Amino acid sequence: MPEIPTEVTAFSSEAQRAQECLRIDRRIQELESGQEADHAAIVALKTRRNGLTILHRLPVEIMSLMFSMVYRCCMDDTQRAYLTLICKHWYNICIDCVNLWNHIDFSHPRSVEVVLARSKDAKITVLIPFWCQANWAYLKLLVPHNNRIRELFIDQYSPDAAFFLRHLVSAPDLEYCDITLRELRLGQTPHYLLSRDFLGNAPRLHTLRLDRCFPHLEAPFFCNLTNFALINQCWAAQFELGALFAVLRAMPQLSDLQISFLVSYEIHGNDLDELCPVPIPFPRLHVLHIAESPANILSLLRIFDYPPTTTLELLAPQDTIATQTQLDTVLSDLGALLSRRMGPFFALRLAGNGVDVQAWKEHETMPILSIRIDALIQVYPSTPDKILQLRQGLRALCAALPLNQLVVLFLADLDLTLNQGMVELFSGLRTLLSLCGAHYGEVPILDDELEGIRLSDLVKFTALRTLAVMGVPVVL
């Protein structure tokens, strides 16, 4: 190979510049692979190589990655099209960047055909935010590519959507499905929207989220689901409730189950015995989220057979309990039930979302009990009667829970006066390792005294070693 000059010369085209860079790279590889590498020559060649590089132009791989990241974060289909109009170089990068063309948004239906063509054989995500007659022509273009759909989001579900789904007779790579039916009114008959033919051919489907709609009872895909959410099913009557139990019984692989506002009436024990005589097993359940009235929470917990390591997130709508007796009874029964289900050690979170439980990585394998006790009644604006009611209810809950096994305690968004009435809670915390509390930037548990219990004594007589303020741990 002839010697390559080290001085920088002008090139008449980008092709010549690229060819010269390739020659230099090959020569550098030859010199570096030799027995006696000529370091001076290698440095000179690299200097010339750097001189040929256009500083304002990033490598194509970096540009593609940047386009993909920006598009996922803050761009829509219209802005994506603008990228291709900047220059010919950007156009070529965008066309070859498959990650730019794996998302179909029917908010811009005219882009469907372009995206399908440019995505080539890549898996795609389909977002259908609303339905209109004008979209049918573009929906028909999507049907032949149903084997490429990985994620499907449908909002404002309608009978037209059901007709469309029946055309998706096979979705072998579908993994995530999220469908919302906003037109349904209380008392209307729900659509069994997901046809058996469609979901029967979705063996990889692992997450199904349904809002105000219900799955087909005979769909065989249930056995593969690991995440299932059924939300705002207030239209359900006893027949649909029994169907729900049948559906849940067909999901042995579930690790995350969310049931929110299932029914608008109280589920009685006699109805449960008839509809679900045998508890529903969830041997792999990791998180169970229930947003129901306290009585229905108790009913559902009784028929769910889950491991003692399951994290529970229990939320009751506000103003669901009217009297102190009802509150004490529900919390006492709940504590007694949970004490029989919890493992040898557990974490307890009371009240709202001010603390990120998952941030405590050292306790991520520990079951967490999350109870929105402040949501059982309306506490804002606070009144002495409401605070007294919650404090007494908290005592009933603490009396039933095995607090001597508590390891981590989360207190967030609790009323300040409620925090000051938790003597019973702190009195039995012999195994407590971490305590976390916050209230809009204030930490009432940092007071020198808490109704006669000094924080220093709490550290002395328990295993408490970590205190967190707004989720930030502090070693004591």
Image (tube, grey):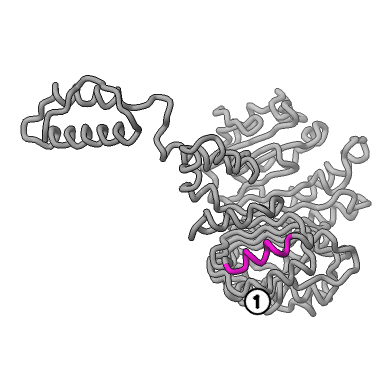
Q: Quadrant of residue 461?
A: top right
Q: Nearer the viewer, residue 372 or 243?
A: 243
Q: Residue furthest left?
A: 35
Which part of the image, by quadrant, shows the N terminus?
A: top left
Q: How packed is label 1: few (under 14 Cα within 10 Å), some, or many (20 or more)?
A: some
Taking 163 as reference, is 379 above or below it? above
Q: Residue at x 68, y 71 (%)?
A: 248
Q: Residue at x 55, y 35 (%)?
A: 86
Any magenta on residue 241? no
Q: Nearer the viewer, residue 370 or 129?
A: 129
Q: Nearer the viewer, residue 452 or 206?
A: 206
Which part of the image, by quadrant, shows the C terminus?
A: top right
Where's residue 325, x and y in %?
Answer: 90, 53
Amino acid type shown at disc 1: Ala
Where's residue 192, x and y in %?
Answer: 75, 73
Q: Residue furthest top?
A: 7
Any magenta on residue 140? yes
Residue that label 1 marks = 219
226 vs 10, left or right, is right
Q: Is residue 283 visible?
A: no
What is the magenta range? 135-144
Where's residue 416, x and y in %?
Answer: 80, 31
Taking 6 as reference, is 197 above or below it? below
